[in-house]
Image (spheres, rainbow, N blue to C red):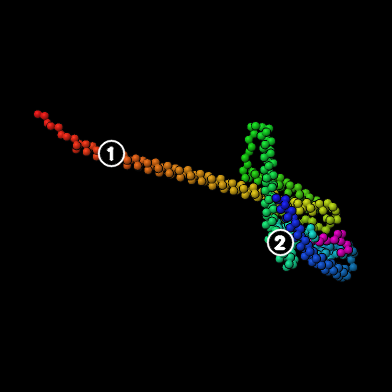
Amino acid sequence: RWLALLAFYILYLLFGATIYYRIESELEIEKNRKNLEERIRIHELLTTNLQPISNDTKKKILDQLSDYCEKKVTNHTEDKYPDPLRWSFYHSFIFAFTVCSTVGYGNLAPSTTLGRMIMIIYSLIGIPINGILFAGLGDFFGRTFIGIYQRYKNYKMSRDNLYVPRQFGLFATVVIALIPGVTCFIILPALLFTYFEGWPYTLSIYFTYVTTTTIGFGDYVPTFQPHQEYEFGVRFIFYKIFIVVWFIFSLGYLGMIMAFITKGMRSKKLAKLEQQLSVNIKATQSRIWHGVTKDVGYLRRILNELYIMKFKQRRKKQRRKKPCLPRTR
């Protein structure tokens, strides 16, 4: 069931990616063309009016200006790699996913009124689909996790007849479930991000955690560096596919953890309610018993008094009916 829903979800993301790629990429290409023209004019203006200095010094000045202005003013023909299209089809797909999953990095956002209105309608449908999918994925992970533990218990019991399985509480269950999740979705993926993005490992851990928990600050986002496609080649394609798979299954695993916590909290509440109900029933029984005992004693006293009164009345009647014996001389 969840596989069919996953297929539908991916098709829905592809549909959204197609819309945003068509709307936003054309505007970005036009904007990049104007920025390039402006960059060429600024570069010519600077190189013409700078005093006669060496080319190395001139390049250093232009590099510093580029860093300060956060726009390149160096000669565009000297760029080693062209800037990647921010609204490429892949990035449009990631944007659609961040909308539906509510991660919301914020590094990409619709720049037109049409795009913003479409995003509202798109998210109204996509967010519920996302919630249903990840609830199903969480249930799948949960059943798999419990099944593995059940097999382990059966194996131990088959080896040792005296083996008694341990009963884990809510906290212990969550910790045990977190260990493989943290390893598979935070620690190991961080190694790939360090390799492909050139981030420090601690920064990669930060990014994987922020994404997995759907915090999504957007201060660091993968696959936007210009050199990656040229430097890594085919490996970069597999890396981008991995990011999508990692996104989906990490959020599904988070759904499993939340389901465990919810079930644990519900079971605790039910246990408290059952305990409270049991105490109330016992107290009610005690009150009823004491009340009935008290009433029985009271009724017994009344019956005894009635019996005594009845006995006295009989004695009086018998005395009245008894004849008087004549006196003997």
Question: Pointer 2 and pointer 1: residues touching (CB < 8 Å)?
Answer: no
Q: Secondary structure at mark 2?
A: helix
Q: Which residues are magenta?
A: 76-87
Question: Mark 1 packing: few (<14 Cα in 10 Å), some, or many (20+)?
Answer: few
Q: Is residue 147 visible?
A: yes
- How many numbered callouts? 2
Q: Nearer the viewer, residue 268 or 217?
A: 268
Q: Position of residue 240 (x, y in %)?
A: 79, 54
Q: Residue at x 56, y 47 (%)?
A: 270
Provide residue 297's location: percent of width, then percent of height.
36, 40
Residue at 71% x, 53% y is 5
Q: Which residue is mark 2?
A: 122
Q: Nearer the viewer, residue 103 or 18?
A: 18
Residue 99 position by quadrant = bottom right
Q: Quadrant of residue 325?
A: top left
**Where is 293 relative to 113, above or below?**
above
What type is the residue that disc 2 sits on? Tyr
Above or below 64: residue 288: above
At a point 75% along the width and 60% down the height, the residue shown is 16
Main SS, magenta residues: loop
Does the rendering let one see residue 217? no
Residue drawn at point x = 86 percent, y = 68 percent: 40
Q: In the rendered view, would you say 228 is above or below 184?
A: below
Q: Which mark is residue 308?
A: 1
Q: Position of residue 131 (x, y in %)?
A: 67, 55
Judging depth in this view, the residue of 77 and 232 nearest the camera is: 232
